[in-house]
Amino acid sequence: MEEISKVPAHVSIIMDGNGRWAKQRGKERVYGHAEGVESVRACVEAAAEAGVKYLSLFAFSEENWGRPESEVNTLMELMMKAIADEITSLAKEGIAFRVLGNLSRLSPSLLEAIAAAEKKTAPREGCEPLMTLVIFLSYSGKWDILQAAEKLALEYAGKPQELHDLPVTALDRYLVTAGIPDPDLLIRTSGEMRISNFMLWQTAYTEFLFVDKLWPDFRKEDFREALAEFARRDRRYGKVK
């Protein structure tokens, strides 16, 4: 295996292709979602082993609420099951768990499970987690920017003159990702070459990697290959080296 000399602090993945994977096998779309959970487990393990500090996964967008009700219900049930099955293991390994997005749209039972999981995996005071696993659920990049702008506007409503002195990065602390470094590497599976309204603000200087494999086929070796590709990239941030 190629030695990885430059490990990204934050890797994000748009997990795409579950439905097509299932269709190729003559199965319902939900079958692909269930198999995709195995890929999540594999990538969490690979990321932690490589020294990645943040692994974020785009699990369900706000636009996904427009899918058939049966599929949405199954996805939410899978999320509940995954939390129940994996949270003890994550806590034991020292991996913190967080869920970000427009959580007001989630059911009370799922919100309760998320809160319990986040509490169980929270590192002890003064300790850093081995890694933080971030799940984006009911998330939209445009929604995130809008809600951040609304919070900023409310804070500066009585002092509009101060707005002119704010740096561009001032919006960062109002985004749902506040305190989390922007992604260094964004991977999208299934061959689609777009980011689908995901972390529009945060990915301004992220390295993108589009791979042809469908998400249920994306496993540890694929994740390691993505890290090796990132290590070969020359990041200039608009400057000249």
Image (cartoon, rainbow, N blue to C red):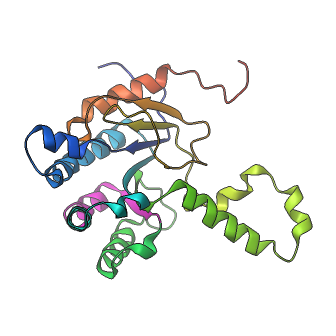
The quadrant holding residue 24 is: top left
Residue at x-position 25% and y-position 62%: 68
Q: Is residue 84 magenta?
A: yes
Residue 140 in picture, x, y percent from top left: 49, 57
Residue 81 in picture, x, y percent from top left: 20, 65
Q: Is residue 109 left or right of residue 118?
A: left
Residue 29 in picture, x, y percent from top left: 18, 51
Q: Residue furthest left?
A: 26
**Nearest the eye: 131 or 197:** 197
Q: Residue furthest bottom?
A: 108
Q: Which residues are magenta?
A: 82-101
**Nearest the eye: 106 or 98:** 106
Residue 80 in picture, x, y percent from top left: 24, 68
Q: Is residue 63 in sight in this rendering?
A: yes
Secondary structure, magenta segment, majority class: helix
* Quarter the N terminus occupies: top left
Q: Is residue 198 left or right of residue 221?
A: right
The quadrant holding residue 64 is: bottom left
Q: Is residue 85 magenta?
A: yes
